[in-house]
Amino acid sequence: MAVRLRGVVLPEGEMREILVDAPGPEVVVAGGFILPGLVDAHCHIGIAPGGAPVTSLEQARELAIVDRDAGVLAIRDAGSPFPYPSLDDDPELPRLARAGRHVAPQRRYLPEIGQEVPPSEVAAEVTRQAKAGNGWVKLVGDWIDRDRGDLSPAWEDDILTAAVQAAHAAGVRMTAHCFEEHSIATLVRAGIDCVEHGTGLSLDVIDEMARRGTALVPTMINIETFGHIADRAEGKFPKYASHMRHLQAGFPAVVRAAYEAGVPIYAGSDAGGGIDHGLVAQEMLRLHAAGMSTMDVLRAGSWGAREWLGFPTGADFTVYDTDPRDDLRVLQSPSHIILRGRLLS
């Protein structure tokens, strides 16, 4: 059915009417505040709660529906061990931007999640994973090195640089999991398109990201788990535990510095595994607490993220009873959801 929306349309803030045309009778949604559908720019519908790969398309669909019902109408899956290209055009699901499997170092990453390869095969694996996704490749830039007892880059600088070049040669954008300091600096200077997490960002690398237009998806909800990770690691890896606590404590200031420098920032929850789905509105609240303005937070989780990922804005809307510009907590309770021109609630 056709949907006629009447309300205050954001970001313009103007009272107007939107007709989302479709065959069938017309339904009118009157009143409220209308926002282009929310975006979770770092999500994993291919990873089940607990951290194992999903085992079926239906399981992946169920996780995506949790996000959809929270108002998330577009997702970037930042690495999936389970392939699900058949869901790309599912009319019931959020629009999907996908990476293939995480390209990861051998015996140093989460079991069963990444495609683990030796240094000599990283660039070739990036090329293979470019075909598995629909526009993105995900690299594991660093992880704990148990021999060193601390975070360490996944590979040497020349391998990281060659990985970025391979992704671009394959015609896709590359992002990378980055916690520690050196891997982020190397990948940004190599021309990577996005940094996930970014806890180890220094001011000079932030300035380089701003100059290049490199995006940051901070996943602040995920970073709040660092204390628990450190507590578990303390006995065997005290240096790593201390490093993780230090990164967590300084992260709000890192996000604020990136924002003030003009780095493009987008909202991503890192749902999948240890983070529940449907929490991108809570991530947006954390971005606001870190220093981003209300309108820039809305942009980071709605129209700006949609533009960055290449998703349309004319058929997906979340409607709220009260103005999210006055209180971002409103984002947790959409009153109506219109996905691909269809009124779902």
Image: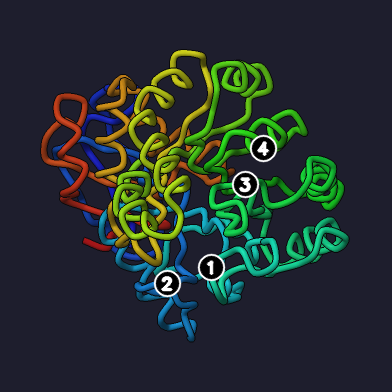
Residue 215: numbered disc: none
Q: Earlier in the sequence, mark 1 or mark 4?
A: 1
The quadrant the C terminus occupies is bottom left
Q: Mark 1 to mark 4: distance in Å?
A: 23 Å
Is label 3 or label 2 in front? 3
Considering the image in quadrants, where does the N terminus appear? bottom left
In this rendered view, identify the residue nearer to me: 173 or 17. Answer: 173
The quarter holding residue 14 reads top left
Mark earlier in primary sequence (3, 1): 1
Q: Residue at x 54, y 52 (%)?
A: 149
Q: Quadrant of residue 168?
A: top right
The residue beneath circle 2 is 51
User: What residue is disc 1 on?
Assistant: 110
Q: Which of labels 4 and 3 is toward the front?
A: 3
Counting residues from the N terminus, which is met first, the one under dot 4 or under dot 3? Answer: 3
Measured as percent of width and height from the top left, residue 212 is found at: 68, 22
Disc with the residue nearer the chain's start (2 vs 1): 2
Q: Amino acid at mark 1?
A: Leu
As drawn, is 208 to the left or to the right of 159? left
Foreground: disc 2 or disc 4 = 2
Disc 3 target residue = 152
